[in-house]
Image (cartoon, rainbow, N blue to C red):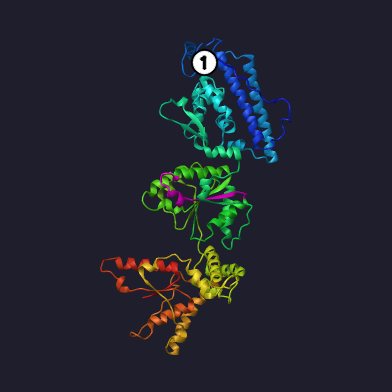
Amino acid sequence: MTLIIFECRNLSGGAVVNDSYADNWEHLEDIVSWLDLMVQWLLEQNAAAMNDVEDPMSPFKGLVVSEQEVQRLLTADKPVVESDWSAALRAEAEALEARMEQRVAASLEQGVFLTLPHVARTFGLSLLEQQALRIVLAVEIDRKYEKLYAYLQDDVTQKHPSLDLVLRLLGLAYGWRVPAHSLFRADGPLRSWFLRIEDDGTRPRLGRTVRLDERMALFLLEGTVFDDQIARLSELSDPEHPLPPLLFQQRVQEQLQAFVQDTGWRSLFVLQGRSGSGKKLQLRHLAQQFGRRLVVFDLKRALQQEAEWPHLLRRAIREARLHQSYLVIDQAGELASGEGAEQRMTTFLDEAERWNGPLFLLVEEPLQSDELRRRRRDLIELPLDVPADTVRHEIWARLALDYPFVEQPDWRAMAGKFRFTAGQIERALRIALHEAEWRQGPGAAISSEVLHAACYRQMRHKLDQKAARLTPRHGFDALVLPSEQKEQLRNACNQIRFRPVVYGEWGFEKRLSYGRGLSLLFAGPPGTGKTMAAEVIAKELFLEIYKIDLSQIISKYIGETEKNMQEIFTEAQQSSAILFF
């Protein structure tokens, strides 16, 4: 049998063993040296097992099975008397392992980032699992291991290690093979996060090839790089990046910080609120407080790849763990909607068990799932409501300081007309500025008309499916009515304008549990101006107006009329529009 001799660097001299590594590659060089020693040790063991019997068929090794090879195989599980050289190699490898451990500890104190120790801490790898990972990683560091592994496995086509070779290089005696197989169990950390075991159906389990996941190979070699595929499905935030302040619901932030820090490390939080309600901003502030990155994974986009989405979710979990980030599942309401909702939720919860920190789900509507509540006793639901009128007034006034206006709008009136979240207010101002600049050029100021149009672009409703939208063209000057009726119409407009003052600042909202809307009854024969009066109010207040034909709503079928009316008023609640029946 041919004996291969490796030239190893002098491990007893050079740098002091307690010195930290200069960088990740210096640590990988030590790993390669350790593996070289283990390969030499295994070759020496193989030579000893042959009992120095010359095999005449050795030139055809891997192609022909000789009698000497059969004898060696039959005695392979018997103890082999270790030679002095073999013992020296094993002792040197163990000494190098100890020195590596010391230098890794020193590197941590110095803040030097080392990928293998990092993933070992992150995924809880034992020393044996770390060593197995080194053996599989080696072919990504130096191609010489392709030839070495092929030689050790008597197969020039097998350039990656098999399960059997990994176990032999770890120095595990045959009596230890059974417990050692737990290294590669399907739910273990190596198989879950790092390794792929290839099964072409022709090899027994021990002969199957072990490969390193391409993404993990890239991380182990290059460090902080992020998974491209997950980055395309996610929003990433850096804790060093400055954040806008929380304009309201600071109490929610205080509760989140206290709970996550003290008792909620493994809890599942469901943040529910409309778009722009501050769900992501709350979590960005939380992550910044604890120096964490935030990975916001878009589940809706992942679900478009029906067969792949559980795999993508697992990769997102792995990426968040690798980068010590908080994981946020955006559009999580998709889990509980449509056909197959319970199966999706079950699959999601199974994958979520792999996550080892607080998990955050973002939804717009309450998440209805019996499976979720049964499986997660640590579920915490946080509704983020639309701010009250007075708070909305303050948000409008504060955010508008950065924008130019033709004339200063009445922010109380804007707060009363539009039940916006802080995010919607910010988007409305930004859209209005872009529209003004498009019309008049850079530096243009925002008019009330443009601002209201931008607000309506934030609306999401389906009134167009139930009613006809009118375009108001007339103001009070065009309306021919007695002064008393005109005054009543003006009072109606003022009631809308000053809602924030009456209900908010004066506190009447607390006294009324419902019925805070405004209803007007216009009576008169055709042509007396009923439709025109409704349009005048809409134009005066810059509100949209929808005309509803009751003959299309009323149905002879029991319950249909009520259902149609409920749908209209539900959509109207989202629109801040005038309904004209």
Boundaries of the magenta span: 290-309
- Please say if 204 is above or below 256: above
Residue type highlighted by circle 1: Pro
Q: Which of the two residues, 153 or 144, is positioned nearer the viewer here?
A: 144
Residue at position x 42%, y 79% in the image: 535
For label 1, the SS is helix
Residue at position x 32%, y 73% in the image: 550
Q: Is residue 328 visible?
A: no
Is residue 298 found inside the magenta-colored segment of the image? yes
Q: Most extreme residue toward the left, as rendered? A: 556
Q: Most extreme residue toward the front, as rendered? A: 59
**Image coords of residue 178 (percent x, y):** 49, 24
Mark 1, residue position: 59
Viewport quadrant of the N terminus? top right
Circle 1 Cα neighbour tier, 10 Å, few/some/many (<14 / 14–19 / ≥20): few
**Image coords of residue 335 (percent x, y):** 42, 50
